[in-house]
Every structure is written in structure tokens, then in C-alpha cells.
Image (spheres, rainbow, N blue to C red):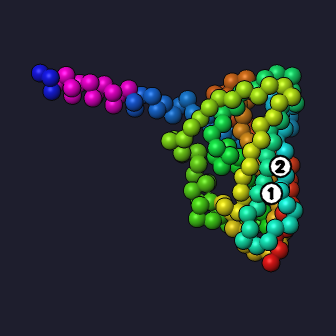
């Protein structure tokens, strides 16, 4: 009898745990529409800057990203880690995509990372969130030359509700030169 009750309790706990992982509530990233679409993210900017414009090969390429709310309403964002939240695009001097490192291959599957802290963070008007990310952990930037880097940070299409369809806020493009 006690064993049966124990088994029912375990089954109940497992069933509720599986039910709590409702993937339909996770935000989906959608590509931004053309310029004819209404701009729901007016006032929200993603500013990207390198610590150094020239970096020796093999040294860390440290980037600072600032998500600034220049609008007149509070926005709410999902925040996990900079590596998951900030989507970099790195191109070489001929604007060809730079190959990923072994860690970068995992970086590209980060939408599937389910065992990670996710918090809803309000960003008031005039406030900003600052992030630091190491670009060459994920992209092979060992060859000397210029690299062009942009970033995206996704927020809800209704900025006050992070569960709505996610749209990217694109950053400025920066250039980092790797020297031998």
C-alpha cells in the first residue's frame, strides 16, 4: 500500500515536471520585417564596441554591448547569459562568414539550452543593460586581418511582454583588426 502511494507520488511529480517544460511558452526568434513594418522597438538600441580596435592574434577579443532603452516606456527582456542573449555575426575582410570554434558550434545551438537561468528584467526609460562577450571564444579569429562584427539582441514584439514573438534589435557594425 505504501509502495503504491509512493509510486503514485513519483508519477505525479514526474508528470508535473514534464508539464512545466512547456516549450510553447518559450519565445521564438523571428526575423525582422521590412522597413514598411511598424517599429515596435522604437527607442531601443544595441550599441557594440570593442575594448581594443587592434588585438594580437590569440589574445581575447573583448566586446561590450549596451542595450539602451531610449523610449518612453519600460521594456521587459529575457536575460540569461551574454553568450546566449547576444547573437554575434563575424565576417572577415572579404565579408565572408568566419568559421566557428569548437565552442562556437555549441554556441550556435543555444536556443536549445533549457537548463539555464532565465529572468525577466525590466529596463526603464533612459536605463541600459551592459554585457561583455569574448568574440574569439566562438569565432576563429586567429588569422591576421580585419573582422567586421555585428550583434543582435531579441526582445518581444510588444516590448512590455517578453513572451510575445521575438524580434531582433540590431547593433552597429564594428571593426576589429587582428595583428600577428
In the displayed structure image, the side of residue 135 where residue 17 appears, left or right: left
**At x 80% / y 57%, what residue is drawn?**
149
**At x 77% / y 37%, what residue is drawn?**
129
Q: Residue furthest left?
A: 1
The magenta segment is 4-16
Look at the numbered discs 2 and 1 and tell me whether their residues touch, using CB distance below 8 Å: yes
**Residue count near mark 2 (Cα–Cα under 10 Å), binned few <14, some 14–19, many ≥20:** many
Residue 57, numbered circle: none
Residue 162 position within the rendered picture, expressed as x and y whole percent measured from the top left: 67, 28
**At x 77% / y 41%, what residue is drawn?**
130
- Pick whichever, 89 or 133, lies toward us: 133
Q: Which residue is mark 1?
A: 149
The reply to whether residue 152 is in sight is no
Mark 2 or 1, nearer chain start: 2
State the CA–CA distance, disc 2 to disc 1. 9 Å
**At x 72% / y 71%, what residue is drawn?**
58
Q: Which residue is mark 2?
A: 48
In the displayed structure image, the side of residue 132 where residue 108 appears, left or right: left
| Label 2 element class | strand
Amino acid at each position: 500500500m505504501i509502495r503504491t502511494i509512493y509510486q503514485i507520488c513519483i508519477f505525479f511529480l514526474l508528470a508535473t515536471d514534464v508539464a512545466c517544460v512547456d516549450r510553447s511558452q518559450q519565445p521564438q526568434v523571428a526575423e525582422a520585417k521590412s522597413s514598411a513594418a511598424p517599429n515596435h522597438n522604437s527607442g531601443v538600441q544595441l550599441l557594440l564596441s570593442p575594448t581594443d580596435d587592434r588585438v594580437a592574434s590569440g589574445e581575447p577579443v573583448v566586446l561590450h554591448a549596451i542595450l539602451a532603452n531610449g523610449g518612453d516606456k519600460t521594456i521587459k527582456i529575457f536575460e540569461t547569459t551574454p553568450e546566449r542573449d547576444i547573437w554575434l555575426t563575424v565576417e572577415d575582410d572579404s565579408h565572408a562568414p568566419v568559421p566557428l570554434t569548437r565552442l562556437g558550434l555549441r554556441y550556435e545551438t543555444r536556443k536549445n539550452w533549457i537548463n539555464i537561468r532565465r529572468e525577466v528584467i525590466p529596463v526603464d526609460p533612459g536605463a541600459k543593460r551592459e554585457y561583455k562577450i569574448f568574440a574569439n571564444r566562438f569565432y576563429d579569429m586567429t588569422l591576421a586581418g580585419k573582422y567586421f562584427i555585428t550583434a543582435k539582441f531579441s526582445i518581444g514584439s510588444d516590448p512590455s511582454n517578453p513572451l510575445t514573438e521575438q524580434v531582433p534589435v540590431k547593433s552597429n557594425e564594428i571593426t576589429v583588426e587582428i595583428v600577428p
